[in-house]
Amino acid sequence: MPITAVVGAQWGDEGKGRIIDYLAQQADVVIRFQGGDNAGHTVINEYGKHALHLIPSGIFNPQAQNIIGSGCVVNPASLLEEMASLEAAGVRLDNLWISHRAQMVMPYHRTLDALEEQARGKDAIGTTRRGIGPAYADKAARTGLRLGDLLHPDWLEARLDNALTVINRKLTILGGEPVDGREMFALLMDYRQRLGDRIVDTVPLLRQALAENASILLEGQLGVMRDLDWGIYPYVTSSHPTASFALSGAGLPARSLDRVIGVVKAYSTAVGDGPFPVELFDEDGAKLREMGQEYGATTGRPRRCGWFDGVAIRYAAWLNGMTDLAITKLDVLDHFETIRICVGYRLPDGRVVTDTMPDTPLLYQVTPIYETWAGWMTPTTDCRSWEDLPKQARAYLHRLSELAGVPIAYVSVGPEREQMFEAR
Ligand code: GDP
Ligand code: IMO
Ligand code: MG
């Protein structure tokens, strides 16, 4: 079986967790390749309902190796909490590994995230306040601490001292309290004791997996529209949720990717600030939110909702080199007499854009151009094949696929593992 990247094709929360959970039943290795505990990947299966933040969504397959890759930023406290909650539900964690190259999110990163957001005032990004931006900033500034540092206490102590000279200055400038180095080191030694055995060099494991022609899934966090380079900068996360980064963040050779599955919600949602051209402020928006239960899996924030955005999907399909679409939450549209699809953005000068993403300041000024489609007004939640779907639903999906220029491989019609099927 091939090496497959599963990436968010919109603004996050497309249903990546549930797709990975489904595909991981056949996988040998599942790797989270970027992001941190800003993720909330909901999985519903025989172990109950879990919102995974750091642990790959393949953890429910006891045969699969699950790796938190080098492209991730890991808050050990969150990881330990998540491990405890999964263990309490009877999930085995024997095959959970963390790359020694992954960066640590420290308590001071969370403090900085909150202070920086406060300082931004009306221009706040609307982060999840999990310390993601400050942790990646430290990585780039080379003041970050890595999981592997826990295995070398003397080195770690020196690295921590060095980091804190800068961090404590930043904290003080932003009105926070400086951090006590000894307290921090004691915390790190506790993490070492509890996580040390899982911190590994992933290269030998992945070399062997490749040699054995293993099936490998690369799990993305968030979606293209919040990619650090390709998203709605500055209203983005501080890593790259796109497939091009998947191999680097996982630690695999560049030419190894066989398949890229773009996970797409049948409509649009976003949490956090920034331009969102298809956002609805009317009854339809409120109905999408209620029917889709669109509240953040990590922060509980209500998600901004709108109709499907064909411009964003074309952009996402191209950037990711998508080979397949997995369309989720089709059932949410069961309740709409008419459904709209955005097929272009009109710029202030009258020009129409269909396949690229205007830069952020311009994106605030575009007007979406919509097509109107008849709804099917029939429950799809019990559909288990393409043929089971109402005719109008199939036509709607066809249109989404046409706009993306990518065939549909999977459709989901409810949050449970069984409520998903192959579309061919
Ligand atoms: P992720 O971050 O991409 O994994 O997505 P989230 O878990 O944050 O958000 C997706 C939400 O939609 C979760 O609450 C899922 O349980 C739910 N969900 C996923 N697929 C479907 C579906 O096909 N239908 C419905 N009704 N809910 C779904
Ligand atoms: P999953 O993996 C939706 C958004 C935040 C904010 C921006 C930057 O579940 O799809 P950050 O905390 O990363 O610095 O915030 O990105 N954001 C998400 N939105 N789903 C997520 O994860 C998100 N992770 C971050 O709302 O706009
Ligand atoms: Mg989510």
Image (cartoon, rainbow, N blue to C red):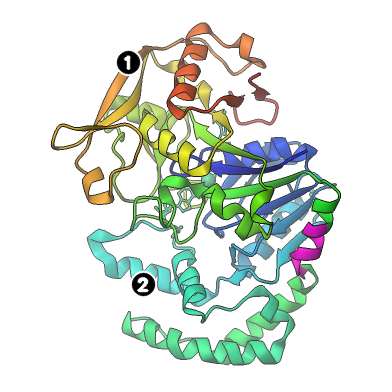
Percent from the top left, x then y, of residue 358?
28, 44
Please tell me how crowded label 2 is: few (under 14), some (14-19), or many (20+) other residues with Cα within 10 Å. Answer: some
Q: Main secondary structure of the magenta part?
A: helix
* Mark pair 2, 1: CA separation: 44 Å
Q: Is residue 252 above or below residue 356?
A: below
Res 382 → quadrant:
top right
Q: Amino acid at mark 2?
A: Leu
Q: Amino acid at mark 1?
A: Thr
Q: Is residue 295 above or below residue 76?
A: above
Please tell me how crowded label 1 is: few (under 14), some (14-19), or many (20+) other residues with Cα within 10 Å. Answer: few
Residues marked 2 and 1 touching at CB (< 8 Å): no
Q: Is residue 408 magenta?
A: no
Q: Residue furthest front?
A: 255
Q: Which portion, as a residue range, is magenta?
A: 199-207
- For the point 61% across and 42% down, the residue is 6
Q: Which numbered disc covers residue 7?
A: none
Circle 1 SS class: strand
Q: Residue furthest top?
A: 391
Percent from the top left, x then y, of residue 351?
19, 32
Q: Residue furthest left?
A: 349
- For the point 81% across and 64% down, the residue is 204
- For the point 75% across and 69% down, the residue is 201
Apparent side of residue 94 relative to residue 391 in the rendered image (left or right): right
Circle 2 SS class: helix
Numbered label tally: 2
Q: Is residue 422 above or below residue 415?
A: above
**Mark 2 or 1: the one toward you:** 1
- The residue pinned by badge 1 equals 372
Residue in front for this viewpoint, 17 or 327: 327
